Amino acid sequence: MRTITFVTQKGGAGKTTLAASIAVAAAASGEKVVALDLDPQGSLWAWGESRAADEPAVDRLTAAQLAKLPAILASLEREGFTLAILDTAGVESTGGNLAMREAALCLIPARPTKLDIQATKPTVEALMRMEMRDRFAFVLNQCPPGRNSRSTEAAQGLSMLGVLATPTMTQRADHQDALASGLGVTEYAPDGKAADEVRALWQWIDRKTKGVPA
């Protein structure tokens, strides 16, 4: 079972929105997906509770359960799950560190601002201490539509710190509307540009974690 962890020590970067939509897109591609909410705020769990669809499976882990994360993931793999999506809190925590250690790939969302890019550095430093240099990538998220210097400069800045996933995610109302409706964006507006970007990002993640050049 592959494990994908969304992590950054900053709130508002879009971890939960991306985790939900990537989980849905992966399930639609044939993966048996479980999305686990490790954030005490429980936003991903609340999204899962509002869904009518059975897939992906969504659950939350308490603080006490986080210490057992490796065993929980092993149990889920025995149950036949092929992909786990972990949504972590926006602060440094033991649970977040465990989630990073267990990941085939850590995704670090960041908005195209100087503050957001600077805020990724503690997460990157933690991953380096864990010797996970080759197991993380940035997702440039909530970018203004169209070509603009802010997104270009942010992409260049993140590329200097590590791998930048493609494509970048544009700020579109479909993302928030989908989350509020208990849907992934590929379910909410399957023919929209936001859905196209999410499917392309999932394909990049899929190739990256299978060792195929992305």
Image (spheres, rainbow, N blue to C red):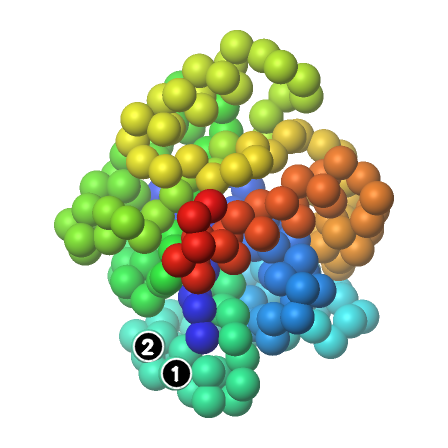
Q: On the rendered structure, is 4 left or right of 162?
A: right
| Residue underneath mark 2 | 70
Give coordinates of residue 14: x percent, y percent: 55, 42
Give coordinates of residue 104: x percent, y percent: 37, 62
Q: Please, is residue 59 above or below residue 41 in the view? A: below
Q: Quadrant of residue 157?
A: top left
| Depth order, front residue of 10/35 | 35
**Amino acid type of the residue that numbered disc 2 sits on in the rendered structure:** Pro
Q: Residue furthest toward the front?
A: 213
Q: Residue at x 21, y 41 (%)?
A: 125
Q: Which mark is residue 51?
A: none
| Residue underneath mark 1 | 74
Distance from the alpha carbon under mark 1 to that under mark 2: 6 Å
Whether residue 64 is visible, yes or no, is no
Q: Quadrant of residue 173?
A: top right
Q: Residue at x 75, y 57 (%)?
A: 183
Could you say whether the residue bearing mark 1 is in a helix, strand or loop?
A: helix
Q: Please, is residue 160 above or below residue 83 in the view? A: above
Q: On the rendered structure, is 165 left or right of 47?
A: left
Q: Residue furthest toward the top?
A: 149
Q: On the rendered structure, is 180 left or right of 150?
A: right
Q: Quadrant of residue 175?
A: top right
Give coordinates of residue 108: x percent, y percent: 41, 43
| Depth order, front residue of 137/90 | 137
Q: Residue at x 36, y 62 (%)?
A: 103
Give coordinates of residue 73: x percent, y percent: 41, 78
The answer to the question of whether label 1 and label 2 lie on touching residues, with beta carbons closer than 8 A, is: yes
Q: Please, is residue 184 above or below residue 142 in the view? A: below
**Amino acid type of the residue that numbered disc 1 sits on in the rendered structure:** Ala
Q: On the rendered structure, is 167 left or right of 189?
A: left
